[in-house]
Image: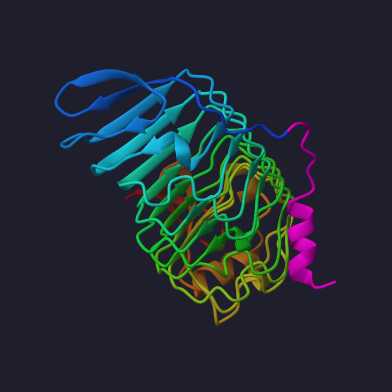
Amino acid sequence: MSKFFSVFLVCVKITAALTPTCERQLITYETVNITPQKLMDFVVKSAPNDKVIVIVDQIIPILCQSLFKIGAKIDLIEILANNIEKIEPNTFFNQNITQHITITGNRIPVIERHTFANLEIMSFNLNSNEIQVIEVEAFANLPKLDTIYLNQNKLQCFNPHSYYQVPELKFLEVTENKIKKLERKSLSFVEQDDFYIFLQNNQIGELDHDSFADFKRNALHLVLNCNFLESLPDGIFNGHTFEQIDLAHNPLKKISGSICDETCSIKFFYLSNDSFKICDRQFLQWAESRNISLALPTFSAGNKIMFGVALTMTLLCIIYFAHF
């Protein structure tokens, strides 16, 4: 069995009880132009000059294409706390939503293949949906997609094959899930320099030696604070450039300069106070020789821009604070 399918099978190990069906039902929703207008219909529709559609606190077990007839272009649809258990593939195909789709506060265990495919959307917010699995090519052929939020779900596996042909993707937030390991080639789908991946507050205790294999872009922002990492494989960052690596609030027992040779560059390396206690002369020499700024993060959770206190480390471990 190939490694690709091994990862896939791990990610889809889930049992479903009863599959909900898409049923015709009255839906109360609001359209927003200058002022909100509340409507009730069997099909959610847009009118000229509408900008936003909001559906809140309904009972809609399954989202399917027949529930929507969005003819006039809108910027955003928000579907909040509607007891959704399933989103059918291609639900939003040929719906005139031009920028953002938000679906939050539901119970959707699986995001199926091609659930979000062939759309002109710029961002998806899928926070707080109890998602356990994102299938291969769940996000596919999305030429304008910039941002995906998958925070506060129940993902145990990070599957890079979930993201296919997303050339403009710059920000991926997968915080507060239950991911335990970064498998090999985890960022092989990334096509942008200056890419941000937020994985803080998971249960990541291991990085595969080849986690970043086939990642060919520059200036990665890698946020892994508040996980379970105790060590890093030798050479894990070789051949890559990082704007920042945030490993604060991990139970690190050893940090060695062997994580990054002359083929690797790191601008800011964030560690917490406890981690600095295990800094040895070799590590500090390595950081100084590679022109790496060791830093204490002051604020990092769920933000695209990271702020920190840069630290100049001498071989005597004297710390000078310089705000930036």
Residue 245 placement (x, y as % from top left):
52, 58
Residue 208 placement (x, y as % from top left):
73, 65
Residue 261 is inside the magenta segment: no
Write the residue at 38% across / 32% down. Answer: 78
Q: On the rendered structure, is 119 left or right of 271?
A: left
Front residue of 54 and 207: 54
Front residue of 193 and 95: 95
Write the residue at 38% across / 48% down. Answer: 123
Q: Is residue 303 above or below residue 190?
A: above
Residue 39 placement (x, y as % from top left):
30, 19
Write the residue at 15% across / 36% down. Answer: 49
Q: Is residue 293 above or below residue 75?
A: below
Q: On the rendered structure, is 130 left or right of 49?
A: right
Q: On the rendered structure, is 5 left or right of 31?
A: right
**Exactly how many numbered labels are in the figure?**
0
Q: Quadrant of residue 159?
A: bottom right
Residue 253 placement (x, y as % from top left):
75, 52
Q: On the rendered structure, is 262 left or right of 324?
A: right
Q: Is residue 258 above or below residue 48?
A: below
Q: Is residue 45 above or below residue 185?
A: above
The quarter of the image holding the N terminus is bottom right
Q: Quadrant of residue 6?
A: bottom right
Determine if residue 230 is in view. no
Q: Residue furthest right?
A: 1
Q: Quadrant of residue 48?
A: top left
Q: Residue furthest bottom?
A: 263
Determine if residue 201 is in view. yes
User: How is the rendered protein coloured?
Assistant: rainbow
Front residue of 194 and 185: 185
The residue range painted magenta reads 1-18
